[in-house]
């Protein structure tokens, strides 16, 4: 089993920055993809950014491209989401996800076997 723990959420004004972290522990040998989804009340989880770890290939939602950057520290089994130029519409609970697949359908929650507890991001205008 794999345990994922997120950190770095908080409250920030529009235009500000936050960095989210996700540390993986347990049987991490089988993780090939890792990244972030977000959810607002009444909606399903939305793919934000995912990285295919082996080749280092990143995937981003169009709404965050150019503002967010995903990276992976393989030695620490830790994923980072650097969020800049934050907007009020980025407000959500952000969840770390990890899976066995090659992220062929990276934006689908069903691609991932392991999930963190979520961390709240609030962006005020």
Image (cartoon, rainbow, N blue to C red):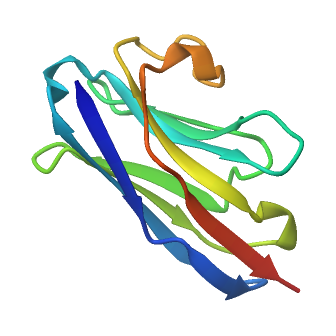
The quarter of the rendered structure image containing the N terminus is: top left
Identity of the residue drawn at 65% across and 25% down: 107
Quarter of the image where one finds residue 33: top left
Query: Residue at the left extreme?
Result: 75
Of residues 60 and 10, which is closer to you in this image? 10
Name the spot of residue 56 as percent of width and height, x first: 34, 33
Quarter of the rendering containing residue 48: top right
Q: From the viewer's perspective, is 77 left or right of 68?
A: left
- On the image, the x and y values in percent for residue 36 come to 54, 43
Asked whether residue 16 appears in the rendered view, the answer is no
Q: Is residue 74 above or below residue 106?
A: below
Residue 111 location (% of width, % of height): 53, 15
| Total numbered badges shown on the rendered structure | 0
Q: Position of residue 83 (x, y in %)?
A: 58, 67
Which image quadrant is residue 88 in? Answer: bottom right
Residue 84 lies left or right of residue 104; in this view the side is right
The answer to whether residue 37 shows anywhere in this view is yes
Tell me the residue at 71%/39% (across/down).
Answer: 61
Q: For the point 14% across and 22% down, which residue is it?
A: 29
Which image quarter is the C terminus in? bottom right
20 relative position to 75: left or right: right
Q: Residue at x 14, y 26 (%)?
A: 27
**32 versus 102 height, above or below:** below
- Residue 96 vs 98, above or below: the answer is below
Does residue 100 lie above or below 35 as drawn? Answer: above
Q: Nearer the viewer, residue 18 or 112?
A: 112
């Amino acid at each position: 089993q794999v345990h994922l723990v997120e950190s770095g959420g908080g409250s920030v004004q529009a235009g500000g920055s936050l960095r989210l972290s996700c540390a993986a522990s347990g049987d991490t040998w089988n993780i090939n993809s890792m990244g972030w989804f977000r959810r607002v009340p009444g909606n399903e989880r939305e793919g934000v950014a995912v990285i295919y770890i082996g080749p280092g290939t990143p995937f981003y939602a169009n709404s965050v491209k150019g503002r967010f950057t995903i990276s992976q520290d393989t030695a620490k089994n830790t994923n980072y989401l650097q969020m800049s130029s934050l907007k009020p519409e980025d407000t959500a609970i952000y969840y770390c996800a990890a899976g066995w697949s090659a992220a062929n359908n990276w934006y689908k929650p069903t691609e991932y076997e392991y999930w963190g507890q979520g961390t709240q991001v609030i962006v005020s205008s």
